Amino acid sequence: MKSPEILASEHIATTRRYFLRLGAGTVAGLAIPDVWAAGNIDHPALVKAMSKLQYLTADKDFRYVGRIKPRISEMSDSERKAAGLTRDSWSLEVIVDSDSKARVRKPMTKKDNTALTFDQLLEIGKTKAVSFLQVMTCNNVADPLGMGWWEGVPLRDILWKTDPDEKVRRVFYHGFHRDDPKWMFRSSLSINRILEDPPGDQPVILCYKLNGEWLSPDRGGPVRMLVPGAYGFKSVKWLKEIKLTSNHLNNDTYAEKGNDVDSQMKTFARILNWKEKVKSGKAIPLTGVVQCGASGLSRVQFWLKPKSESWPSEDRYFDAAPWKDAEILPAPDDDWGDLPKVKSLPEIRHQTGADGKPVTWPLRNTIVHYAALLTNVPEGDYEIRVRTIDANGIAQPMPRPFRKSGDNAIQQMKLSVGN
Ligand SMILES: Nc1nc2c(c(=O)[nH]1)N[C@H]1C(S)=C(S)[C@@H](COP(=O)(O)O)O[C@H]1N2
Ligand SMILES: [Mo]
């Protein structure tokens, strides 16, 4: 359960620059989160702590979502090997759904010794591998689970090897589940999404690396599906089997409990590092993270409302409130992080140029940080809220306020200013 704290620490590296720009005079006497509490931004211990902070989330610091018990990470190496969940034992079967009219002329099966091995996947990767930045978010969890730089082979390059016929309409896939239906986690995609990427979009990949290192067991290693722009449930972990089908229907496990399984990522803001009690007379820093979804991001806003002030219930999304703009922070320039393998980023199609710098900012389907400084807040009790305005000018939680296609409710925190 690290995610909010980890995300909080990771965004300090970028927010630091914002507060530095405000000048040392402003910084002295700030009521700031613990890590800043020395009151002196140049304090060596503080500088050292902040220099370790990063934009990307280390594999071990992602928040884990997975229903199988015991966890794959709790198995011994030999158990994982027996289950085909190590790089030397893994293989992928690509077959037709038994109810399907679709056919593949060259199925990949264990029985015929044609299942795809990890080495074969890497071999294909030598010419076909792609990587891209994407945030991992569960549509039912308010904070993103982690921010990753993922690498793998486009799924279409594997599917074409099976020589499928034109009756294929959907691709069904599920993760390792000890052959127990209770742990089964299924998802699916239209064949079209796999075969072709709209301009600016990344391909669906068979993913084996995160932040330059092999995927860990908790992250779905050795190989997981990674679906660009989709919520986490499409990115099935411990992938072992793919079925091509003429079926046109969605078979996702996540269709249960009312989830909308066709949802693209939404744009929304979260508050991080908030202190609910602040001494009067001190400036109050507000920082946080935005998931930049399908409709992009133009502004991040906040609103401080005295607790006693009532608000008309018909204005359920507070459209008439006196929102103020926060600052959207720039891309980390030279410090994507000192994760073991990520000092800098390579050229990534649609995301970075030859110098590894983002071609636009923020990037869709990634996070971005924001900051604002609240000054002269009179003593009293307040509620603070943040929201995004997407690139189409639409304020959160519109245009898609329904929770089961992604939790993007406007976040509210308490603030009490006193002695
Ligand atoms: N095999 C399998 N894959 C799975 C799941 C699961 O339960 N089993 N959970 C999914 C859900 S709901 C989410 S949100 C993401 C979370 O990915 P993470 O644990 O790497 O953060 O994994 C997805 N992949
Ligand atoms: Mo999820």
Image (spheres, rainbow, N blue to C red):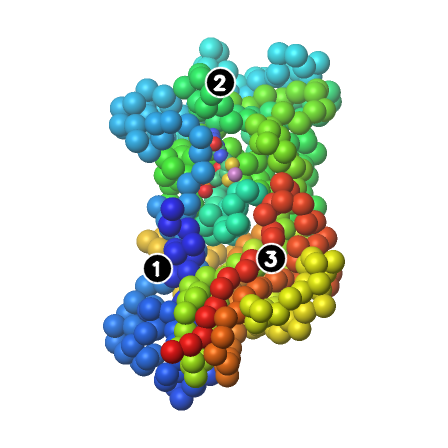
Which is nearer the N-term, disc 3 or disc 2? Answer: 2
Between disc 3 and disc 1, the foreground one is 3
Which is nearer the N-term, disc 2 or disc 1? Answer: 2
Q: Is residue 305 visible?
A: yes
> CA separation, marks 2 and 1?
41 Å
Between disc 3 and disc 2, the foreground one is 3
| Quarter placement of the C terminus | bottom left
Residue type at the position of mark 2: Pro
**Residue drawn 40% across the image and 89% down it:** 25
Label 1 sits on residue: 338
Q: Is residue 361 visible?
A: no
- The answer to whether residue 128 is above or below residue 95 is below
**Residue drawn 29% across the image and 72% down it:** 46
Residue type at the position of mark 1: Asp
* Callout 1 crowding tier (Cα within 10 Å): few <14, some 14–19, many ≥20: some
Between disc 2 and disc 1, the foreground one is 2
Label 2 sits on residue: 181
Label 3 sits on residue: 410
Under circle 3, the secondary element is loop
